[in-house]
Image: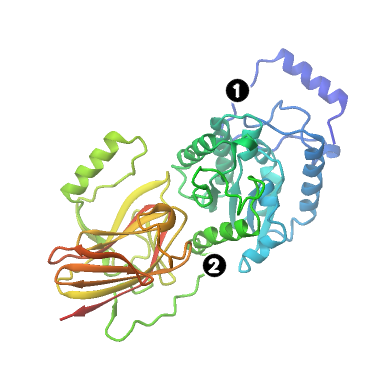
Amino acid sequence: MRFTSILALCLLALAGCATPPPAPAPTVSITPTLTPASHFSIPDNDIGLPGTGPIRRYPWFQKLWIERRAAWAGNSERDQHAVVFLGDSITQGWGPSLASSFPDLKVANRGISGDTTRGVLIRLQEDVLSLHPSAVVLLIGTNDLEENAPPWSVASNLRLILAALHDHNPVLPVIVCAVMPSSPTKKRPAFLIRRINQLILEASIDQPQVTVLDTWKLFADAQNDAPIAEFPDLLHPNAAGYAKFAAALRPIFATLGLIESKPDDFTPEPGFIPLFNGKNLTGWGTRPTTETELAITRRLQASDPIAPNWPAVIKPAHYDGLSVSPDGRWLAQAGRLTATTPPGGRSIQQLWTNREFAQNFILKLEFRATPNADGGVYLRGPQLQARDYLIAGPYQKLAHFRPLDWNELVITVINNVAHCTCNGEVLEAALKLPVTGPIGLEGDRGQLEYRRIRIRELP
């Protein structure tokens, strides 16, 4: 419902006489004052509204906005403390299957087809914050492009959304999903989507409660557009697309402690001893960054404006008894040793066993990677890549790799040469190693989880 004509005329008159208001600070109110008759309506104009860029006012959109928001208001008590999925038609289109995709979670769908980042900002307080959510999953921005908004406008509004969520609860977990691929025929070319996604990373770099999930790489085809098999209209996922989306979210929910919270029930095979106790970081720590690694860091950061952060370690440290590393990057939880998603996109951080291994050995472990995640396993120093192989490489032709699921590495070291397999397929047939050294794990981009880490020393 619209403002009354008298109120609209008054506002326009005041706007004509007054100096335009300054850009809103992150802490400004995000809820415009509406008359009771227009409680669920889109304001008639942009005067006094936070953010920048388009607010859609097409008749169909105004009708949908009112209908969905009024229905949610009636379910407010039911949806308290849910994981709130917030966004546009991709979120709305998940529909009833959202709950079945996450049977262990209480979820609330707050997607409105056609919405923009500024529309989300306007309705954030009533539709989301009033629910006191346990977490928020945000996917928004594609419709801004259709309305010719520049990428910086999307990022600016996202920053205001994140600020409002932080003001409501500084430790509220927020999963920001990268804008998914589409097509130039939908006024959503890949180069603009990629620019938005880079700005999303930059906008969240100082937000430790925010996890950015690479749902662009998850779906992009060889031309960096949406694949027909999962996006039949080049904009909205089908059932297969939503299933992949759900699978990408589950490891993040697990790390947040929302699912998979029970200890891993696993017993090592005879002759194997665990290197990770499943509960804390006992037996693990850091070692000083080598001169070779420092040289690589300097070279990368001098030539690449988005080179990864690589914090230098000066003194070794043991993390015995800790469940979280002092920098917060490594987490021991429910049988999993996790390199959490770094703010800003990339940060190379390593974790090493306190002891070294000079004998021949068989090392077994499993890892799970979020989309395009990059990590690794160090064998006395040299690294075996542990990644979302089919997207991030280097082993992109594996037939048995399970994306977004657990995969087993088996590494057999004989006479300082490592034979490495993933789910039985050879990754490296003869990786040369030093005569001794520790076992290490790495987190770089995305989230990497490791579990069931055990070793059998051989004669």
The secondary element bearing badge 1 is classed as loop
- The residue located at (41%, 80%) in the rendering is 266
Q: Mark 2 points at which residue?
A: 259
The x, y position of residue 358, in whole percent, is 14, 71
- The residue located at (56%, 44%) in the rendering is 179
Q: Mark 1 points at which residue?
A: 22
The mark that comes first in sequence, 1 or 2, is 1
The x, y position of residue 85, in whole percent, is 64, 53
Check the image and report above or below for 450 versus 34. below
Question: Horizontally, is 175 left or right of 322 in the view?
Answer: right
Seen as rendered, the residue at the extreme top is 17
The x, y position of residue 243, in whole percent, is 60, 61
Marks 1, 2: nearer the viewer: 2
**Which of the 4 image quarters holds residue 282?**
bottom left
Question: Horizontally, is 182 left or right of 203 in the view?
Answer: right
- The residue located at (84%, 39%) in the rendering is 36
The x, y position of residue 264, in whole percent, is 44, 76
Question: Horizontally, is 194 left or right of 266 in the view?
Answer: right
The secondary element bearing badge 2 is classed as loop
Mark 2: which amino acid?
Ile
